[in-house]
Amino acid sequence: MEPQDKPECLSRFRFLTPVQVVWGDMDSMRHVNNTRYFYYCETARIAFFHLLDANTDDSGTQRERDGIALAETGCRFKVSLTYPDTLTIGSAVESIEPTQFKIIHHIYSEKLNCIAAEATARMVMFDFTKGKRVNIPDDYMAVLQAHMLAD
């Protein structure tokens, strides 16, 4: 999505990820299954993490070093999505602490012309070899601060 095409309701988000709703996302009630919203947000987070070069290399596999781990997630469902639809996930950093940060996602439906869901994800910087939290590196911190939710 080009910046001039960004819906007003996503104007506070600097990072946008397009996602297509596919037929298999729907359940027997003929709307997108709630679990798929979490998948859409995961897709947006992974795309965002490529900015950090955090958890994945070019093949998409976990590196054996410090990385980012999902500690908590939630979603507020506002309207039901159906196939076909094109979604735009607006992602932004809402808060940052020394070892963790919170990302918010707004899922925008082109078909419905509204925000279909609002989700959050609390991420922690983690040393996978020692099994404990570590401070977010300065270079990651700079990228996170550059992607804070705009005022």
Image: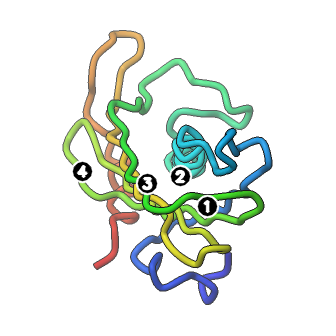
**Residue visible at 71% across and 65% down in the picture:** 86
Other-residue count near label 1 (Cα within 10 Å), few / some / many at <14 / 14–19 / ≥20: some
Q: Tell which circle, 2 or 4, labels the residue nearer the N-terminal end.
A: 2
Mark 1 element type: strand
Dots 2, 4 in contact, CB < 8 A = no
**Residue visible at 52% across and 48% down in the picture:** 41
| 11 left or right of 33 in image | left
Other-residue count near label 3 (Cα within 10 Å), few / some / many at <14 / 14–19 / ≥20: some
Q: Tell which circle, 1 or 4, labels the residue nearer the N-terminal end.
A: 1
Distance from disc 2 to disc 1, alpha carbons, whole Å, reads 9 Å
Dots 2, 1 in contact, CB < 8 A = yes
Question: Which quarter of the figure has residue 36?
Answer: top right
Distance from disc 2 to disc 3, alpha carbons, whole Å, reads 22 Å
Q: Mark 2 against mark 3, which lies toward the viewer?
A: 3
* Number of numbered labels in the structure image: 4
| 20 left or right of 72 in image | right
Any mark on residue 17, and which?
A: 1
Distance from disc 1 to disc 4, alpha carbons, whole Å, reads 22 Å
Distance from disc 2 to disc 4, alpha carbons, whole Å, reads 15 Å
Quickly name the residue at label 3. 77
**Residue visible at 60% across and 69% down in the picture:** 109
